[in-house]
Structure formats: C-alpha cells, structure tokens
Image (spheres, grey):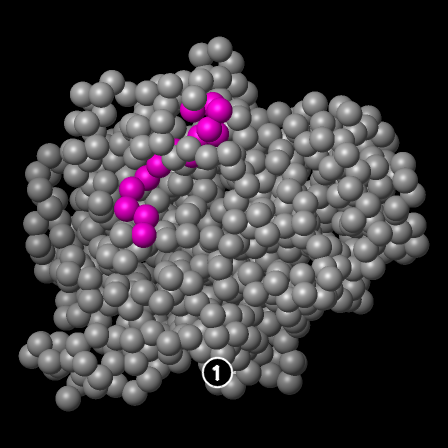
Amino acid sequence: MTDHAALLLGVPAITKPVDTHCPYCALQCGMTLTRDTADWTVSARDFPTNKGGLCRKGWTSAALLSAPDRLTTPLIRDRKGMRLRPASWNEALDRIVTDFRRIQAEHGADAVGVFGGGGLTNEKAYLLGKFARLALGTANIDYNGRFCMASAAAAGQRAFGIDRGLPFPLDDIPGAEVILLPGGNPAETMPPIMQYFAAQKRRGGKLIVADPRRTPTARAADLHLQLTPGTDAALANGLMNIAIRDRLLNDAFIKQRTTGFDAVRRICASYWPDRVERITGVPAAQLQRAAHMLGEAATAMLLTARGAEQQRNGTDNVLAYINLILALGHAGRKHCGYGCLTGQGNGQGGREHGQKADQLPGYRKLDNPRHRAEVATVWGVEPGSLPGPGLSACELLGELGSKIRGLFVVASNLLISAPDADNVSGGIGGLDLMVVADMFLSETARRADVVLPITQWAEEDGTMTNLEGRVLLRRRAQAPPPGVWTDLEIFHALAERLGCSARFDTEPGRVFDELRQASSGGPADYAGITYERIAKEDGVFWPCPDHAHPGTPRLFLDGFATADGRARFHPIQYRGPAETPDREFPYVLTTGRVLSHYQTGAQTRRVAELCEAEPDAFVEINLDTARGLGVAAGDMVRLTTRRGTAELRARVNRDIRLDTLFVPFHWSGQAAVNRLTNAALDPVSRIPEFKVCAVRIEKMPAARASSAAANPSPSSRE
C-alpha cells in the first residue's frame, strides 16, 4: 500500500526507519524516524554533530507530522475584508499570476517582492532565488535570515574574505583552552552542543560568557561578563586595550598573517578599563581577568551569537571581537578561530545560494559582472537580463503598500519575526496581493490573499547546511497529505504560467545537481557534493570543488580567503544603540529564545508537550527592579516603547541586570514582543536592532490584568 493510499483510507503506512535530521536549529541533529502504528517515533542517531543527543524540541518533532490544523488545500480571499475560502490549485495559481502580472504592468517588475526563509532546504532556497529573478524578473527578494546571522556574515566576509558559520568542525571546540561567547545561550537554544563545552571543561578549558542575563549558559561559565545591552564593541576594545598594555599580543602572527593592526592599536588606546567599566557595567577586574585568560591560552575561540549581532552596530561588534582574537593569534590554527553560532536550520545554506537581495548561487555577488556571467550561463540567459541587488528584508517590508504592491512569502511568519511588527502589519494591509506558502495558517498566512499548503520536513528530500558548513541530507519519511504541494512544484507551476522558459525542476536531486553546477567556482562551492557522498560520509563540508576533493572541515589553516591570504583588522569605535533609556522609557528591552520554543512558535506552539513546558510569554525582571515597581512574580505588566505595547506576565529573579528587561519572541497577539522592537538597521549587514530599545514597564490594574490573562488574543496560540 502506498503512503497516499494509506492516508486516504485512514490507515498508517508501515515504513522502514528513516535516517534524517531535526527540523529546527542549525545544529541539524541526526535522528531516525520509525512508524509501525499511527504515530512516528523519534530516536537520536549517533551522528557527528549531536552524537546521540537531542533536545526536547527534537524529541517531540514528529508531533508536527500529524498536527490537526495542517493546511491541505489552497485558500483564497476574494476581496479585502472577506474570509479565506478553499480553492483549487488551478484557481489559486491563476489568481497569483493574474494579479502579479497586473501589479508589474502598472508599477514595474520590482513592485513584486519575494520573502524567503532560513528553514528552506538548499534546493528550495536556490530555486526561489532563480524564480524571483527569472520568472518574476524582480530585484526584490530577501529572507528572514537577514534578521539572524547577517552581521556575523558581513564581519566574516570583511575580516577573512568568506563567511561560513564555523570555519572548523564542532569537534575542535573541546581543544580550545578558552572560549569567549558573546551574546549566546546555546544551553537553551541548541542544547546538544553543550556536550562539546562540557568536554572542553573536562580537559581543563575555560568558558567566558558576555550576556546581560545570567542564562543557563552563563551559569556554566567560568566568568560571566554581565554587560549592558548594546555595548559589545566597547567591551571588545577594552579587552584589546588590556592585551596591548600587558603585552599579551602574538606579534609574529600579526606580522605574518594579518594587516591593519596599527589603526586598531590607536583606536583601542582610549578604551582603558575604567572607561569601559562605565560604558558596559562590567567591572575592570573582570575585564582584566578575561583578557589574561584569552591572552595566556595556547588555543582560544570566539563564538558570537544573536546578542552581539542583532544590533544597529552588529557588524562593528563582531569585527571588534575578531580584532581581539586576531591580535592574540587565535585564528588559522586548529582549536582556534572565530565562529558564529548560526541559528536557523538552514541559516548557513540559506544565505549561500541566491535568496538574499544581493546574492547569486555559490555565495556570488549580484554586482560582480563575472559572477553574473557565470550564473547566467548555467541558467541559459544573458547576464544583463538579471536584475541588480534589491531591498534588504527590513527595507522591503518598509515599502509594503508603497513601492512593493505584491508579496510572495515562503515559510516565514513576518508578523511575529519582523521588528516594529505593527508597522509591517499596516504595510500588509496596503498590498494588492500577498501570497503565503506555509504548512499552517500562521499569523501571517491569516492575512494573506492566497495561501498555498506546502510540505514539511519529513515529506520531502533535500539538503541542509549546518552551522559547521557541513552539507546534510534530509530524507522523506512519508508522503504529504493529499492536496499539499512541494515548494519546488509551486515554483515550477508559477514559472510555467508566467511564461518563463527557464528550467524549474520539481525533483530535489535534479535541483541539487543544478545548484552544484551553479555554485561551481564560487566561494561556497558544492560541485563535488552529491546525495550519495553526503549519506556515505555523514555530510560533506564546503568548499568541495570536485568529486575527488575530500571537503574542507577547516578553513584558513594555510591562509585566509583574501586576495593576499591575510586576515583584515578593522578599527572600530564604539557607537551606542539607536535608543538609550530616558525619563519616559527608563529601561532597556532585549529579546531572545527559550528552551521549549523555536523562532515564531508556528511549529512549537502546536506541540502539546512544549506548550505545557512553556505555555505563555513573559517578561524577565530583576527582583529589586520589580520591588521598586510594586510588581510581584506572576503579575501582569504592560511594556511600552515608541512603537507599541505588549502585555505579559512578570517573571522575577536576580539573573538579569537591574536596567534590563527580557522577553522571548515566540508568541503573538498582545504578547508579541516584536511589536515593540526597533527596526534601526546596521549600515553594513542591514540587520535590525532586536536586542536593544528603550522601554517603559507598568503594573496593569487588577481588572485589566484579569481580563488580559483570561482572554488572550485569538492568535496568541496560533
């Protein structure tokens, strides 16, 4: 009996165990799916990344495969203000093509925007970029990865000439004598990775965490630098000042393998410890200890995460930290280097193959004539026919209803993930057509004019590239429900209706073969990677230019990816965040994730066990701050910024700074913290400043609080 027949008869198909990977974070833990009854069972694989470990999200991930509110038919809104209704695929696709053609005829090709996602497989991300540029002819495509790792990517490109989350395998982490981790909490966001830090500790290694909160990761550290949000560059420059003063530098490494240090030396001369303590709130004695731990270690690593990166100055922050690691000589050697703890499942591969505003496959650049010619040859078009670079994610969303009149959203929940979300909501209201392709009726899909039901992780084959740059293979375990299409099938059908003669294959393996060809010769070269090699070798590290090449687990051992092989220092002056506390908004708001949920919660809020573990949003407040406000644990409070308000339950402890409030971003309605966050952009990476804005907090009146708690927003459980 086929899977489809079994589903139609209501009888589960009996399948062999399927080795695949978790649908969540960039660790991409290996797992096995087994089904011999109505339900799937998840077991952990002894895979090189997770080594038999899974977090609670991974263990419960199979629940998504039988979610009762799964979309199984297209939906159409006939006119604004009307309800979505079921429609056939032909009707939905014809509506999309008719309206997109009209919009482009009236407003130009770039009036239709495309918004992708960091959870898309490499095949889908590649074909989405091709679809936008060839079938729609628009320059305006970007993706939600712009909200995540963009600052780290930009800094890596500038300092080393290439961006790969970790330029070394995870197995190198235990060999680092000291690790500096600014703005990361992997104990909650990526729990299986903590086994590498535990192994480092067993070897006598030390961990330094820089974070405004005493997170589970910070509690595991040997030194916690509890800095004020938004002061990372000052902290990094202060550590450099001490390293210079106390002669901790590796002069030979600086001379032989880098360029530009003298300008950094001059800048950092003014960041003496007492001044940096006043800026960051980190005691000078702790700065001294951290600098010497790093400077006296034989091997050390720098691992940044969203806390340091999601700021208006995120690229500068990362570059300032990289300056430190270069000056100490902790790069280009085994058990050393800079890495980014990439967040989304395909956050690495998703930023390599063309769904970014300025990018072509293989990490090529749209404004590079040679790169355009190379990809145009593979696609069978003239280089001049390719659109130029378009608007970045926040800029694209800021033009909704204005320059952007139509929007195609693929597997992204903008109304929860984007900063200043109320402004985005208003822009959506001004669109002539919004199309959303998703597995569930997310908050964003509810606002769409056309909704397309798509396959999820265990219903299709495809590759993912994890935080190490290891290309992995997700395997199909079951057929999708009847009526559900793959993204590749949608791109093919729309391109055909739009009259595009370019090839849009629907079979993942053939799309990957085309991706390999398109990436060949580029910085992220997949040419020598095949499905067969991935399965046989437990993944293949890029670059891998041909079949005989073993892949590249470690970059930079023989030189950096710059024209002269040297890493680049960058002189960085500390600049404050776009908003700082004042009398009207006296606290700092920062955001992040919690153990039981992932991203916008569109998946994890549908898993009962995860909802039971963390049912509602909250604001974390320091105990002394709460007392001064008359707020007790469990009270409902209202947070207000210059953009909006949110109503949340107070969680009180001593783990957070007195001046800082923390809210996770997984919830919607009145608990949606991104209604408050600031869309101020980094000038290089174009990442928004999720991690810092000025906020006011007040205890809600008892009657209003009771009403808010008893009657959450209809979409708050979406």
The spot of residue 192 in percent (x, y) is 50, 64
Q: Is residue 283 magenta?
A: no
Give the crowd class for mark 1: few <14, some 14-19, many >=20 residues within 10 Å.
some
Horizontal relation, residue 42 to residue 300: left or right: left
The spot of residue 93 in percent (x, y) is 19, 57
Looking at the image, residue 475 lies above or below residue 504: below
Taking depth in this image into account, of 133 and 499 the one nearest to the observer is 133
Looking at the image, residue 16 lies above or below residue 30: below
Horizontal relation, residue 395 to residue 105: left or right: right
Note whether residue 456 is visible: yes
The spot of residue 533 in percent (x, y) is 52, 83
Q: Which residues are magenta?
A: 613-626
Determine whether the residue tagged by mark 1 lies in a helix, strand or loop.
helix
The spot of residue 689 in percent (x, y) is 50, 33
Amino acid type, callout 1: Ala
Taking depth in this image into account, of 528 and 160 the one nearest to the observer is 160
Taking depth in this image into account, of 222 and 263 the one nearest to the observer is 222
The residue indicated by pointer 1 is: 535
**Which residue: 31% across, 71% down?**
458
Q: Quadrant of residue 715?
A: top left
